[in-house]
Amino acid sequence: MNILAFDTCFGAVSAAVRWRSTRGEWLQREAYEERTTGHAERLFPMIAEVMDSAGLAFASIDRIAVTLGPGSFTGVRVGVAAARAFALSTGKPTVGVTSLAVMAQRADQLLGRERADRPLAVAVDARRDMVYFQLFPDLAVRTDEALLATPEQAASAIGQIPVLVVGSGAAAVAAAAGDKAQLRLPDLQPDAGSLAIMAPDLGPLDRLTPIYLRKPDAKPQADKALPRMPL
């Protein structure tokens, strides 16, 4: 299975390609760049870069993976629209999970033994004294469990089991939760490399539905037709 994965939800743009070698082992090429603007302008060149590095043609991709949100309204729309365009051009299935689930996967990799099977919680600053929040008793995830909550509501959702909280909103949640939450990785972002690892276990979606959790500050322009990608 050849997988193309990408993310544009928060403060980074990333893309990854994952495929099996002739010996059956997984190989991966990925690119990651932190930025607050210009996600749409950077995404397609970055995808072309990892595809070229992997030596794969777009026609050889078997599955397209994308983060569905939450995130900035523009960022979420960029990623989902790109996935729809690739699916239309290639006829291949798409999969997706929350940006917070991808962050949990990345945190599990970075924390290693420090995690010690403790539950993870991901909290990202959503401004206006709110956080995007998702709790992971384990890494078996669903796409509909992310919440827009106050730090106090997130702390209440944690319950009494000690957890590690990661992400830009983790400090606020940890302060509200007290001793039952420990702050880790406050600068963590979603990473397409982690999404590519998750993708083989995700079920194809009939329709990619963005997860915004809050209304946009401004009314978006009508969707414009995207160019057909080269095969």
Image: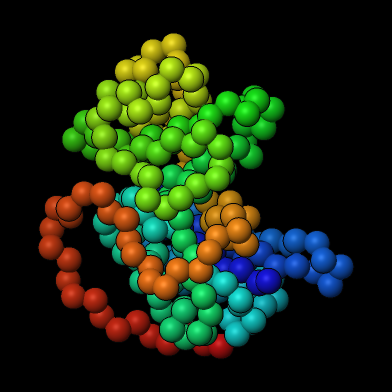
Res 198 → quadrant = bottom right
Q: Quadrant of the C terminus?
A: bottom right
Whole-percent x, y for residue 153 in the image: 27, 27
Residue 50 shows up from this direction: no
Which residue lies at the image location 47% right of the left edge and 78% below the top edge? 86
Q: Quadrant of the N terminus?
A: bottom right
- Colour scheme of the rendered structure: rainbow
Res 138 → quadrant = top right
Identify the residue at the far right of this view: 23
Q: Is residue 103 above or below residue 137?
A: below
Q: Is residue 185 above or below residue 179?
A: below
Whole-percent x, y for residue 66 in the image: 47, 62
Whole-percent x, y for residue 108 in the image: 60, 37
Which residue lies at the image location 67% right of the left edge and 78% below the top edge? 56
Which residue lies at the image location 32% right of the left edge and 18% below the top edge? 176
Instruction: Count numbered badges in the picture.
Output: 0
Res 112 → quadrant = top right
Whole-percent x, y for residue 142 in the image: 46, 50
Q: Nearer the viewer, residue 213 or 185?
A: 213
Identify the residue at the far top of this view: 179
Which residue lies at the image location 84% right of the left edge and 72% below the top edge? 22
Q: Nearer the viewer, residue 62 or 137?
A: 137
Residue 184 falls left or right of residue 111? left
Residue 100 shows up from this direction: yes
Q: Nearer the viewer, residue 94 or 170?
A: 94
